[in-house]
Image: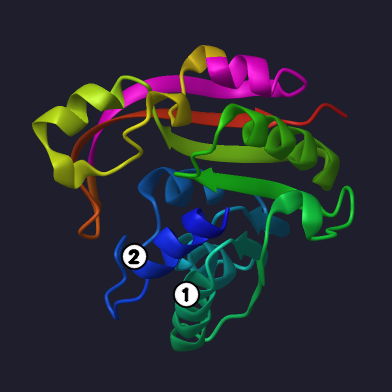
Amino acid sequence: MNNIADNWNSRYSSDEYVYGELPNNYLKEKLLKYSPGNILFPGEGEGRNAVYAAKNGWKVWAYDISTAAKIKAEKLALKNNVHLDYRIGEIQNLKYDNEHFDATALIYLHMAENERKILSESIYNLIRPDGIVIAELFSKNHIEYQKKNSSVGGPRNIDLLYSIEDVQKEFNNFKIIELKEEEIELFEGSFHSGTASVIRFILQKPI
C-alpha cells in the first residue's frame, strides 16, 4: 500500500494535471441524466471528475491513497469555486455512513481481486436503494492496445483489468442498467491518450 501510494504521489507531483482538468466523457454524459444528490468518487486522483460533479450541483465526497492527489484536487476545486470532502485512505476505513450516497463513480480505478471485493461490498452498503454506480474501466483486452501505444495508459497487469464477466460477478447484487465493452479514443492528459478498450457500466441498487 505504501509503495503504491508513493508511486501515485510521484505521478501527481508535477504542476500538470496528468489526466487533464476535464471530466471523463462517459461520466459527463451519464451524470447529466440524474438529479443531483450525494456522490462518492473512490480513487479520485487529481479531482477532475469530482469537480465536474460539484459544478453541476452534486454534493461530492472523494478519496484516494495519494496525498499529492488530494492537494491538486482541492486546488482544482478552489479554481472552480466548488467544495469537495476529500479524504486520504481506503473505503473500508473512512467511516462513511451507510446509505448516504445517491451515486458512486468508478473512473479508472483498478485494484487487485481481493480489494475489488471489499470495494463492491462497501459501495453496496454506502449507496441508497435505487442509487447508481457509473463506471469506466480499462478492459482485459486493453493489454493489446498498450502494446501499440504506451501513451494510452492503464495497468499492465491483466489481473487489474476488467471483463464484463468480472463486473457481473463482483457486482452481482446490483441491477445492470448498462454494461458494455467499447473501443474509444482517449484524450485525458498525457497519460490517457489514444485508442483504448474499456468496460462501461451503470448499475442500480435494488429497492
Instruction: Classify mark 1: helix, strand or loop.
Output: helix
The one nearer the camera, 56 or 164, is 164
Left or right, residue 151 beside residue 98: left
Q: Residues within 10 Å of mark 2 (few under 14, many from 20)?
A: some
Name which residue lies at 21% across and 42% down: 152
Name which residue lies at 75% across and 41% down: 123
Q: Residues within 10 Å of mark 1 (few under 14, many from 20)?
A: many
Left or right, residue 80 beside residue 126: left
Among all residues in the image, which is located at the extreme left? Answer: 148
Q: Which residue is mark 2?
A: 11
Instruction: Classify mark 2: helix, strand or loop.
Output: helix
Q: Amino acid at mark 2?
A: Arg
Q: Is residue 62 above or below residue 55?
A: above
Name which residue lies at 29% across and 26% down: 142
Q: Please check the rendered image and state whether residue 172 is part of the magenta-colored stretch, yes or no.
A: yes
Could you tell me how far apart the alpha carbons at marks 1 and 2 are, in whole angstroms? Answer: 9 Å
Q: Is residue 148 above or below residue 163?
A: below
Label whose residue precedes the other's in the sequence (1 or 2): 2
Left or right, residue 173 beside residue 155: right
Residue 46: where, in percent of width, then height?
44, 68
Is there CB contact under 8 Å for labels 1 and 2?
Answer: yes
Residue 59 in view, yes or no: no
Residue 114: where, in percent of width, then height?
66, 30
Q: Quadrant of the C terminus?
A: top right
Q: Amino acid at mark 1?
A: Ala
Name which residue lies at 58% across and 61% down: 64
The one nearer the camera, 90 or 166, is 90
Q: Please check the rendered image and state whether residue 72 is part of the magenta-colored stretch, yes or no.
A: no
Disc on res. 139: none
- Magenta segment: 166-185
Disc on res. 68: 1
